[in-house]
């Protein structure tokens, strides 16, 4: 490792490089001959993203729909069309449709009545659009949008970013409540414009943070699932606090409060989710013993953990871009996928754009999955982990009409496999409109 890389603090957590197999994957995807050191790699990756290869590139978007609302995207993009109309009149969209949890593609027409999918009819159509479920992101921290800090944040270790108090907390604590709400709103607008319909936020700042999230969510078409982050003051009414949220999360899966929160969530039908196995495996046993609906990261999963996940039907939210940037490591995604339900998430907005398009492309090029499996990780699997699989995450008759329509006259022109095109090539400028009913 170069002296420059040693000084930047990037490898202080573990002091080791990516394993040889992952280096070969990264070389195949990003480097013609050899993998540069981490700082060079991330700078190159940022340049590629800015050019549009990781979605969100600049370009005009279609806003011709009469029910569209203009929303902000990320810097360099123009407005995208987000349809949140609740009108009673039917809406139809036609093209190649990814139907059901299996995402089998048909040519046909989808009809929406009263905010739900009334029918999906296989028939010849003139449209070349590709229609998929709106993405479901099971792990975000969108208040971190106030802490977007470019290269400076990338030069910190995991502990320097998040612990005692951590760069993230230092930056966020200096932001006003209005600034935090504005940052969340901008991120949610970008999510909707780039195809995401629902996201789970691991919401710090207690009940005030949940209130901020709910207030912003009422004004945005994308659905927020806010998890109250504990531990909570012992004198507070834990059940009442959880009732005001969509579930509970804690970074410390130990003790009576975590067990009580799990039981309360089960009784209320709310989401109980955790973080585990991120910088080390030390918290994995305690996390899995609580039998959460799902846990996130699992970068340091051990051999015995795969069986525990399978036996207890504990899902995993995988965050590969975040793990690579922060830890210089990637989750054992193929092994996790063999054991349980895996969904893709984007993690904190401080270091990663909340783009499921970027997460899908990254995952499809570094791991051995079919395009359909990756699309499922970005849609139906996240819906299932967040206890919403009966309502969203796939295009089925009777479900809520939450879908993304991609145009095929730009980056997706002449694609042979429509699902592979969406997963590996689509950018925000290819989104014709996102329908969120």
Image (tube, helix red, strand yellow):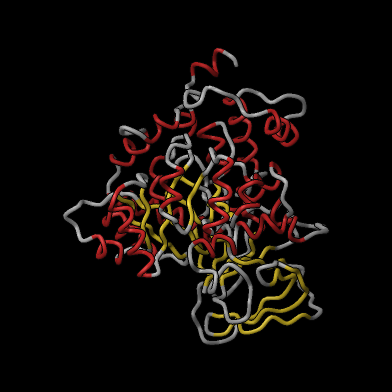
220 versus 336 height, above or below = below
299 versus 195 height, above or below = above
Q: Position of residue 29 (x, y in %)?
A: 73, 37
> Residue at coordinates 37% horizontally, 37% vertically from top-left?
168
Front in this rendered view, residue 296 or 359: 296
> Residue at coordinates 68% horizontally, 33% vertically from top-left?
22
Figure quadrant of residue 285: top left
Task: Indicate left or right for 232 with 73 as reference.
Answer: left
Q: Position of residue 54 (x, y in %)?
A: 64, 45
Which image quarter holds the N terminus? top right
Q: Position of residue 309 (x, y in %)?
A: 54, 52
Front in this rendered view, residue 158 or 335: 335
Task: Indicate left or right for 60 with 108 as reference.
Answer: left
Figure quadrant of residue 17: top right
Tell which residue pokes out farthest to the left in this image: 235
Q: Position of residue 201 (x, y in %)?
A: 42, 55
Task: Indicate left or right for 215 with 98 as reference.
Answer: left
Front in this rendered view, residue 205 or 92: 205
> Residue at coordinates 69% horizontally, 54% vertically from top-left?
423
> Residue at coordinates 49% horizontally, 80% vertically from top-left?
86
Tell which residue pokes out farthest to the top in this image: 3
359 versus 3 height, above or below = below
């Amino acid at each position: 490792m170069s002296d420059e890389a040693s000084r930047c603090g990037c490898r202080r957590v573990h002091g080791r490089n990516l394993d040889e197999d992952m280096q070969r994957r990264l070389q195949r995807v990003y480097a013609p001959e050899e993998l540069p050191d981490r700082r060079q790699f991330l700078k190159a990756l940022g340049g590629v993203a800015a050019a549009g290869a990781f979605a969100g590139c600049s370009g005009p978007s279609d806003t011709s729909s009469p029910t569209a609302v203009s929303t902000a995207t990320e810097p360099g993009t123009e407005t995208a069309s987000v349809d949140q109309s609740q009108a009673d009149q039917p809406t139809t969209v036609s093209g190649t449709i990814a139907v059901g949890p299996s995402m089998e593609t048909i040519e046909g027409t989808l009809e929406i009545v009263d905010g739900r999918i009334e029918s999906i009819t296989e028939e010849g159509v003139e449209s070349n659009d590709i229609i998929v479920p709106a993405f479901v992101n099971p792990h975000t921290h969108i208040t971190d949008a106030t802490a977007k800090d470019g290269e400076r944040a990338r030069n910190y270790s995991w502990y320097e970013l998040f612990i005692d108090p951590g760069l993230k907390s230092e930056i966020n604590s200096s932001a006003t409540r209005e600034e935090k709400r504005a940052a969340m709103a901008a991120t949610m607008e970008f999510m909707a414009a780039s195809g995401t319909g629902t996201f789970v936020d691991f919401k710090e700042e207690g009940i005030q943070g949940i209130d901020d999230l709910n207030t912003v969510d009422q004004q945005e078409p994308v659905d927020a699932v806010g998890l109250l982050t504990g531990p909570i003051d012992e004198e507070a009414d834990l059940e009442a606090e959880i009732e005001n949220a969509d579930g509970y999360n804690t970074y410390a899966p130990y003790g009576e409060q975590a067990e009580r929160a799990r039981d309360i969530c089960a009784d209320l039908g709310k989401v109980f989710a955790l973080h585990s196995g991120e910088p080390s495996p030390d918290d994995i046993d305690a996390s899995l013993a609580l039998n959460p609906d799902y846990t996130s990261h699992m970068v340091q999963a051990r051999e015995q953990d795969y069986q525990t996940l399978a036996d207890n039907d504990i899902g995993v939210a995988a965050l590969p871009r975040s793990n690579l940037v922060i830890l210089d490591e990637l989750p054992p995604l193929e092994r996790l996928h063999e054991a349980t339900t895996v969904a893709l998430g984007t993690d904190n907005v401080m270091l990663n754009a909340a783009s499921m398009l970027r997460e899908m492309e990254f995952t499809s090029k570094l791991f051995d999955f079919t395009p359909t499996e990756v699309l499922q990780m970005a849609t139906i699997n996240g819906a299932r982990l967040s206890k919403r699989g009966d309502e969203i995450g796939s295009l089925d008759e009777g479900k809520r009409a939450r879908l993304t329509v991609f145009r095929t006259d730009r980056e997706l022109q002449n694609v042979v496999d429509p699902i592979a095109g969406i997963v590996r090539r689509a950018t925000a400028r290819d989104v014709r409109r996102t329908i969120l009913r």
